[in-house]
Image (cartoon, rainbow, N blue to C red):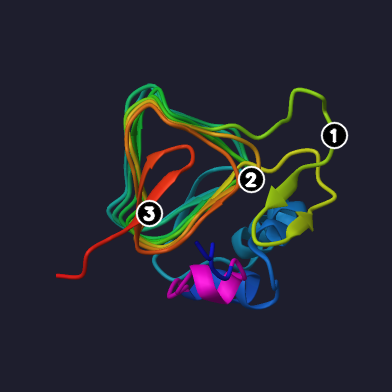
Amino acid sequence: MDKGDIRTSALFDCRTEYLRELFSKHEYPWEMLTELKEYIEKVIERGLPGYRLISEGVLVGEDVKIYPTATIEPPAVIGSGSVVRPGAYIRGSVITGRDCVIGNSSELKNCVLLDGVQAPHYNYIGDSILGNLAHMGAGSICSNLKSDGRAVVIHGDTEYETGLRKVGAILADGADIGCGSVLNPGTVIGKNTSVYPLIPLRGVYPPDSIVKGTDTVVRREKR
Protein backbone atom coordinates (compact mmCIF):
# COMPACT_ATOMS: atom_id res chain seq x y z
CA MET A 1 0.00 0.00 0.00
CA ASP A 2 1.29 3.43 -0.97
CA LYS A 3 2.12 5.26 2.25
CA GLY A 4 1.36 8.64 0.74
CA ASP A 5 2.97 12.05 0.49
CA ILE A 6 4.53 13.21 3.77
CA ARG A 7 5.41 16.74 2.74
CA THR A 8 4.09 19.50 4.97
CA SER A 9 1.65 20.75 2.34
CA ALA A 10 0.12 17.27 1.95
CA LEU A 11 -0.35 16.62 5.66
CA PHE A 12 -1.63 19.97 6.92
CA ASP A 13 -3.99 22.76 5.97
CA CYS A 14 -2.58 25.48 8.18
CA ARG A 15 -5.22 28.15 8.67
CA THR A 16 -3.67 29.58 11.84
CA GLU A 17 -2.36 32.95 10.69
CA TYR A 18 0.57 33.14 13.08
CA LEU A 19 1.76 29.66 12.05
CA ARG A 20 1.47 29.94 8.26
CA GLU A 21 5.00 31.25 7.81
CA LEU A 22 6.42 28.32 9.77
CA PHE A 23 4.47 25.73 7.79
CA SER A 24 4.97 27.30 4.36
CA LYS A 25 8.76 27.52 4.54
CA HIS A 26 9.48 23.84 5.29
CA GLU A 27 9.03 21.04 2.77
CA TYR A 28 8.91 18.41 5.53
CA PRO A 29 7.31 18.97 8.93
CA TRP A 30 10.18 17.76 11.14
CA GLU A 31 12.29 20.60 9.71
CA MET A 32 10.24 22.99 11.89
CA LEU A 33 11.51 21.49 15.11
CA THR A 34 15.00 23.01 15.11
CA GLU A 35 13.72 26.59 14.84
CA LEU A 36 10.55 26.27 16.88
CA LYS A 37 11.79 28.00 20.02
CA GLU A 38 13.12 30.97 18.09
CA TYR A 39 9.92 31.19 16.03
CA ILE A 40 7.70 31.22 19.12
CA GLU A 41 9.85 33.88 20.74
CA LYS A 42 9.40 36.08 17.66
CA VAL A 43 5.61 35.61 17.75
CA ILE A 44 5.60 36.63 21.41
CA GLU A 45 7.82 39.64 20.74
CA ARG A 46 5.54 40.86 17.93
CA GLY A 47 2.39 40.11 19.89
CA LEU A 48 -0.98 39.01 18.53
CA PRO A 49 -4.29 40.91 18.49
CA GLY A 50 -6.42 39.89 21.47
CA TYR A 51 -3.57 37.94 23.10
CA ARG A 52 -1.92 38.86 26.41
CA LEU A 53 1.13 37.86 28.39
CA ILE A 54 0.20 36.02 31.58
CA SER A 55 3.85 35.66 32.58
CA GLU A 56 7.18 36.28 30.94
CA GLY A 57 7.29 34.42 27.64
CA VAL A 58 3.77 32.95 27.88
CA LEU A 59 1.20 34.46 25.50
CA VAL A 60 -2.45 33.37 25.61
CA GLY A 61 -5.46 34.19 23.48
CA GLU A 62 -9.02 35.11 24.36
CA ASP A 63 -11.19 32.73 26.39
CA VAL A 64 -8.29 30.47 27.34
CA LYS A 65 -8.91 28.52 30.54
CA ILE A 66 -5.84 27.48 32.54
CA TYR A 67 -6.36 25.55 35.75
CA PRO A 68 -4.28 26.61 38.78
CA THR A 69 -2.34 23.34 38.99
CA ALA A 70 -1.16 23.51 35.35
CA THR A 71 2.46 24.52 34.67
CA ILE A 72 3.47 26.50 31.58
CA GLU A 73 7.15 27.23 30.97
CA PRO A 74 8.23 29.75 28.31
CA PRO A 75 8.23 30.25 25.49
CA ALA A 76 4.65 29.26 24.82
CA VAL A 77 1.65 30.51 22.85
CA ILE A 78 -1.76 29.09 23.74
CA GLY A 79 -4.44 29.74 21.12
CA SER A 80 -7.81 31.34 21.81
CA GLY A 81 -10.52 29.12 23.25
CA SER A 82 -8.06 26.48 24.43
CA VAL A 83 -8.14 24.68 27.79
CA VAL A 84 -5.12 23.67 29.87
CA ARG A 85 -6.47 21.23 32.43
CA PRO A 86 -5.28 20.35 35.97
CA GLY A 87 -1.78 18.94 36.21
CA ALA A 88 -0.86 19.67 32.59
CA TYR A 89 2.85 20.40 32.09
CA ILE A 90 3.95 22.54 29.15
CA ARG A 91 7.76 22.44 29.15
CA GLY A 92 8.41 25.26 26.73
CA SER A 93 8.63 25.78 22.97
CA VAL A 94 4.95 24.92 22.54
CA ILE A 95 2.57 26.80 20.26
CA THR A 96 -1.07 25.94 19.63
CA GLY A 97 -3.89 27.06 17.41
CA ARG A 98 -7.44 27.70 18.56
CA ASP A 99 -9.69 25.47 20.68
CA CYS A 100 -7.09 22.93 21.76
CA VAL A 101 -7.35 20.72 24.85
CA ILE A 102 -4.22 19.97 26.87
CA GLY A 103 -5.44 17.52 29.43
CA ASN A 104 -4.83 16.40 32.95
CA SER A 105 -1.28 15.15 33.49
CA SER A 106 -0.42 15.61 29.82
CA GLU A 107 3.13 16.81 29.08
CA LEU A 108 4.17 18.76 26.00
CA LYS A 109 7.49 20.17 24.83
CA ASN A 110 8.85 21.56 21.57
CA CYS A 111 5.70 20.91 19.58
CA VAL A 112 3.04 22.50 17.40
CA LEU A 113 -0.70 21.92 17.72
CA LEU A 114 -2.97 23.28 15.02
CA ASP A 115 -6.64 24.12 15.62
CA GLY A 116 -8.86 21.79 17.61
CA VAL A 117 -6.18 19.33 18.73
CA GLN A 118 -7.11 17.20 21.75
CA ALA A 119 -4.56 15.63 24.08
CA PRO A 120 -6.96 15.25 27.01
CA HIS A 121 -5.67 12.47 29.26
CA TYR A 122 -2.15 11.40 30.31
CA ASN A 123 -0.44 12.11 26.99
CA TYR A 124 3.20 12.84 26.23
CA ILE A 125 3.87 14.94 23.12
CA GLY A 126 7.52 15.79 22.52
CA ASP A 127 9.14 17.20 19.37
CA SER A 128 5.95 16.60 17.42
CA ILE A 129 3.55 18.29 14.98
CA LEU A 130 -0.20 17.67 15.37
CA GLY A 131 -2.62 18.77 12.66
CA ASN A 132 -6.10 20.22 12.81
CA LEU A 133 -8.54 18.15 14.89
CA ALA A 134 -5.93 15.50 15.65
CA HIS A 135 -6.84 13.47 18.72
CA MET A 136 -4.69 11.55 21.18
CA GLY A 137 -6.55 8.83 23.06
CA ALA A 138 -5.97 8.47 26.80
CA GLY A 139 -2.43 7.36 27.63
CA SER A 140 -1.14 7.51 24.05
CA ILE A 141 2.34 8.98 23.71
CA CYS A 142 4.70 10.41 21.11
CA SER A 143 8.07 8.90 21.89
CA ASN A 144 10.81 11.21 20.66
CA LEU A 145 14.17 9.53 21.38
CA LYS A 146 15.53 6.24 20.06
CA SER A 147 16.99 3.84 22.59
CA ASP A 148 20.36 3.98 20.82
CA GLY A 149 20.38 7.79 20.77
CA ARG A 150 20.97 7.92 17.01
CA ALA A 151 19.34 10.37 14.62
CA VAL A 152 15.76 9.50 13.71
CA VAL A 153 15.05 8.03 10.27
CA ILE A 154 11.49 8.14 8.97
CA HIS A 155 10.61 4.91 7.18
CA GLY A 156 8.16 5.74 4.39
CA ASP A 157 8.13 4.74 0.74
CA THR A 158 11.72 5.97 0.97
CA GLU A 159 14.04 6.56 3.92
CA TYR A 160 14.08 10.12 5.24
CA GLU A 161 17.20 11.05 7.22
CA THR A 162 16.09 13.79 9.61
CA GLY A 163 19.53 14.39 11.12
CA LEU A 164 17.78 14.95 14.47
CA ARG A 165 18.18 12.91 17.65
CA LYS A 166 14.73 13.91 18.81
CA VAL A 167 11.70 13.61 16.55
CA GLY A 168 8.36 12.52 17.96
CA ALA A 169 5.25 11.96 15.85
CA ILE A 170 3.73 13.78 12.90
CA LEU A 171 -0.09 13.59 12.99
CA ALA A 172 -1.80 14.98 9.91
CA ASP A 173 -5.16 16.75 10.00
CA GLY A 174 -7.89 14.54 11.45
CA ALA A 175 -5.59 11.77 12.71
CA ASP A 176 -7.08 9.84 15.64
CA ILE A 177 -4.85 7.75 17.92
CA GLY A 178 -6.36 5.01 20.08
CA CYS A 179 -5.88 4.80 23.83
CA GLY A 180 -2.54 3.48 25.05
CA SER A 181 -0.83 3.50 21.67
CA VAL A 182 2.88 4.33 21.43
CA LEU A 183 4.11 6.32 18.44
CA ASN A 184 7.79 5.51 18.11
CA PRO A 185 10.21 8.26 17.01
CA GLY A 186 9.49 9.48 13.49
CA THR A 187 6.02 7.98 13.13
CA VAL A 188 3.80 9.75 10.59
CA ILE A 189 0.02 9.30 10.56
CA GLY A 190 -1.77 10.41 7.40
CA LYS A 191 -4.84 12.61 7.09
CA ASN A 192 -8.07 11.23 8.58
CA THR A 193 -6.45 7.97 9.62
CA SER A 194 -7.59 6.22 12.80
CA VAL A 195 -5.50 3.91 14.96
CA TYR A 196 -6.86 1.13 17.15
CA PRO A 197 -5.93 1.19 20.86
CA LEU A 198 -2.75 -0.34 22.31
CA ILE A 199 -0.77 -0.44 19.08
CA PRO A 200 2.98 0.28 18.85
CA LEU A 201 3.45 2.39 15.74
CA ARG A 202 6.54 2.89 13.61
CA GLY A 203 7.02 4.38 10.14
CA VAL A 204 4.50 6.06 7.86
CA TYR A 205 0.78 5.24 7.71
CA PRO A 206 -1.30 6.38 4.72
CA PRO A 207 -4.22 8.81 4.75
CA ASP A 208 -7.90 7.81 4.96
CA SER A 209 -7.09 4.48 6.59
CA ILE A 210 -7.67 2.42 9.70
CA VAL A 211 -4.64 0.98 11.48
CA LYS A 212 -5.70 -2.26 13.14
CA GLY A 213 -2.19 -3.47 13.98
CA THR A 214 1.41 -2.40 13.50
CA ASP A 215 1.42 -3.94 10.02
CA THR A 216 -2.33 -4.20 9.41
CA VAL A 217 -3.78 -1.22 7.59
CA VAL A 218 -7.06 -1.03 5.63
CA ARG A 219 -8.55 1.75 3.59
CA ARG A 220 -11.44 3.57 5.21
CA GLU A 221 -14.72 3.02 3.40
CA LYS A 222 -16.14 6.16 1.85
CA ARG A 223 -19.49 7.27 3.22
Along the viewing direction, whichever of 71 and 115 lies nearer the viewer: 115
Point 43% across, 28% down: residue: 106
The residue that disc 1 covers is 150
Does residue 219 belong to the magenta stretch?
no
x 43%, y 29%: residue: 123
Query: Which of 169 and 160 lies nearest the eye of the viewer?
Result: 160
Residue 175 tag number: 3
Q: Which residues are magenta?
A: 6-16
Query: In the rendered image, which quarter is residue 116 located in?
Result: bottom left
In the rendering, which numbered label is found on residue 93? 2
Q: Residue furthest left?
A: 223
The residues bearing labels 1 and 2 have C-alpha atoms spaced at a distance of 23 Å
User: Residue 56 location, x and y as percent?
Assistant: 60, 43
Q: Residues within 10 Å of mark 2 (few under 14, many from 20)?
A: many
The reply to whether the C-beta atoms of the residues labelled 1 and 3 are less than 8 Å apart is no
Image position, residue 153 (x, y; %): 76, 47
Query: Residue at (27%, 53%) from the top-left corner?
Result: 63
Residues at marks 3 and 2, CA–CA distance in whole angstroms: 22 Å
Q: Secondary structure at mark 1?
A: loop
